Amino acid sequence: MDSNNLPTRAQYRSKKHPKHFYSRWWFWLIIIIIILAGGATAGMKITSTGPFKETTTKVEKKIPLKRRSKSRLV
């Protein structure tokens, strides 16, 4: 193996290597903002309806008076 083409350790360290996007501060700031927004949204949904409260209402179908009278007579 020819090691003449490889840079020395000092040469490698002196070069500017671009950072990965996940090692930048702004990436983690965006992740934290997304997590906080999701938690706040979920928290608002829980507090507005209660943690385990179901809000269902039953609607009864009303039969018109004419149909009631005919069905009773027959």
Image (cartoon, rainbow, N blue to C red):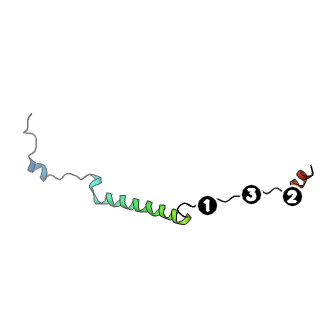
Q: Which residue is mark 2?
A: 65
The residue lying at 92 percent from left, 52 percent from top is 73
- Mark 1 or mark 3, which is nearer the start of the sequence? 1
- The mark closer to the camera, 1 or 2, is 1
Disc 1 element: loop
Task: Name which of mark 2 and mark 3 comes first in the sequence.
Answer: 3
In-image side of 59 versus 17 (left or right)? right
Q: CA distance from mark 2 to mark 3?
A: 15 Å
- Residue shown at 48%/63% (left/top)? 43
Across and down, in percent, residue 26 comes to: 31, 60
Front residue of this view, candidates 38 and 30: 38
Amino acid beneath label 3: Glu
Lateral position of residue 45 relative to residue 56, left or right: left
Q: Is residue 57 left or right of residue 36?
A: right
Tag 2, which secondary structure?
A: helix
Q: Amino acid at mark 1?
A: Thr
Q: Which residue is mark 3?
A: 60
Question: In the displayed structure, does residue 52 sit left or right of residue 24?
Answer: right
**For mark 1, what is the residue?**
55
- Give the residue type at disc 2: Leu
Q: Secondary structure at mark 3?
A: loop
Q: Spatial distance from mark 1 to mark 2, Cα to Cα?
A: 31 Å
Mark 2 nearby-residue class (10 Å; few <14, some 14–19, many ≥20): few
Sequence order check, earlier mark of 1 and 2: 1
Looking at the picture, how far across and down is residue 1, in whole percent? 9, 33
Q: Which residue extends farthest left?
A: 4
Q: Residue furthest top?
A: 1
